[in-house]
Amino acid sequence: MSRSKILVVEDENIVAKEIQKSLIDLGYRISGLVSSGDEAIRSAEKMRPDVVLMDIKLKGEQDGIETAEEIKNRFDIPVIYLTAYADEDTLHRAKITEPHGYILKPFKSRELNAIIEMTLYKHQAEKLLLEREERFRRLFEQSNDAIFIHNLDGSIIDVNTRACEMLGHGRKELLLITMGMLHPDTEDEVTKRAYQTIRDTGSICYESQFKKSDGTLIEVDISAGIIDEEKGIIQAIARDITERRRTERMLKENEKLIAQGRMATRIAHEINNPLGGIKNSFLLIKSGVPEDHPYYEYVDIIEREIDRISRIIDQMLNLYRPGKKPITEFSVDEVIRDVMAMLESKCRSNQVSITTEVSKSPLVVNMSRDHLIQVLFNIIQNGIDASPPGGVVKIGVSEHGDMLTISVSDEGDGIPEDLRSQVYEPFFTTKKDSRKKGLGLGLSVCKSILDTMDGSIRFESEIGKGTVFHISLPFT
């Protein structure tokens, strides 16, 4: 039985009493019987009924329609109109106030009960919908990613605050343009293919570029999907990955330089040995050539050229030696999270996930942050490539005295016994998939970097189960 509170606003006392009796018989509570608009507003404010039954014709300056509008706006209480008048002007004025119901006198208790219950249900549903909309709006506005709501032709319907910040445009500016206008001309084909995929499949994830208000370009990772098929409404979430891509390019460039350095070292070693023999032999010859010999001037030229070759080799070695990186204090956990973010799209495309097991309190180290990022990026990326779809790459962090150990395990095929001695050699790779093959420099580069940091790297591998790499570094 319902125990909802009803406020009855009726200027005819006998009718009001009849309504009161009907409501009580139906199981409702009466929060008040009033006959004027002023009384109705005061009673609604004080008693906060669940529903107001409002007669349109009331005593006083305000009629029922004006009173209902004020009650709805101030207290959000649903109103049902009760009246014997059903002329078009009255109905039109009543509709403007968006009442929850309209019942003509005289009425039966069954009709009154039905419309009250429908009003209670409808009002509760509207409140839940408003709450959900408010929650969505808060999530929408507080998101760290830019969110665009647009239709199939790209016309922007709504954007969140982060989208405005990312692009340097105001909300009103963005609502006047299309999504296509945010992309540079070079991305036209990418954008067309993306929209076609959305039409065909309903969603897409892809990388593109956005043009900011000042003309600069940023790289973005976009996830878009249809959220209203009937109206063709799309939600696109864009994440700025410019810094991530810059870091990845830097890592690749560093890998190339270090690999060139290792090759330069080998070449220099191969040249220096015979060059040393040539110079020693030449010095013996030089000592036997008198200064007045007609070819003595060529002896000096030969010596200068031998020395010049030696200097060129030294310059080549200096050029490719790993440069010193600034030593800073930072959290290892934070670096691991940054590298995981860089590899997020790779995990998604390979259908591989990453889990971490770190210490309860953050481990703070004092070393080259860039070098550690480069090492972890290579090792974790190898783990992702080695693992099958649905596989997991696990990262663990531990400390042993003054040494930090980071372990990265994959669920790949493992490294065959006969190939393990070649793992750190330049241009060697165990990757069978040509799409995943690189230059085979990753582990070689990692070892070189760790050597400069007084660290080390080792691995354990089991065929059919996977491989674990252990990176050990001093805390300072």
Image: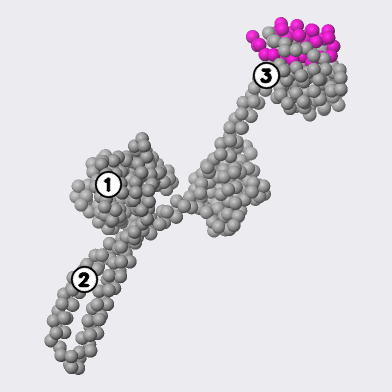
The CA distance from mark 2 to mark 1 is: 34 Å
Q: Amino acid at mark 1?
A: Ser
The magenta segment is 1-26
Q: Could you say whether the residue bearing mark 2 is in a helix, strand or loop?
A: helix
Which-is-in-front pick, marks 2 and 1? Answer: 1
Q: In the figure, 406 relative to 308: above or below?
A: above
Report, in whole angstroms, how far the alpha carbon at label 1 lies from the one at label 3. 67 Å
Q: Is mark 1 in CB contact (under 8 Å) with mark 3? A: no
**Which quarter of the figure has residue 289?**
bottom left
Please identify, in this view, whether the residue under mark 3 or under mark 2 is nearer the observer: 2
Q: How is the image coloured?
A: one colour
Looking at the rendered structure, which numbered label has been put on residue 272?
A: 2
Q: Give the image location of residue 444, x and y in percent.
A: 28, 55
- Say whether residue 9 is visible: yes
Question: Which numbered dot is residue 472?
Answer: 1
- Report the front residue among 470 and 358: 358
Q: Amino acid at mark 3?
A: Leu
Q: Which mark is residue 120?
A: 3
68 to the left or right of 232: right
Which is closer to the viewer, label 1 or label 3? 1
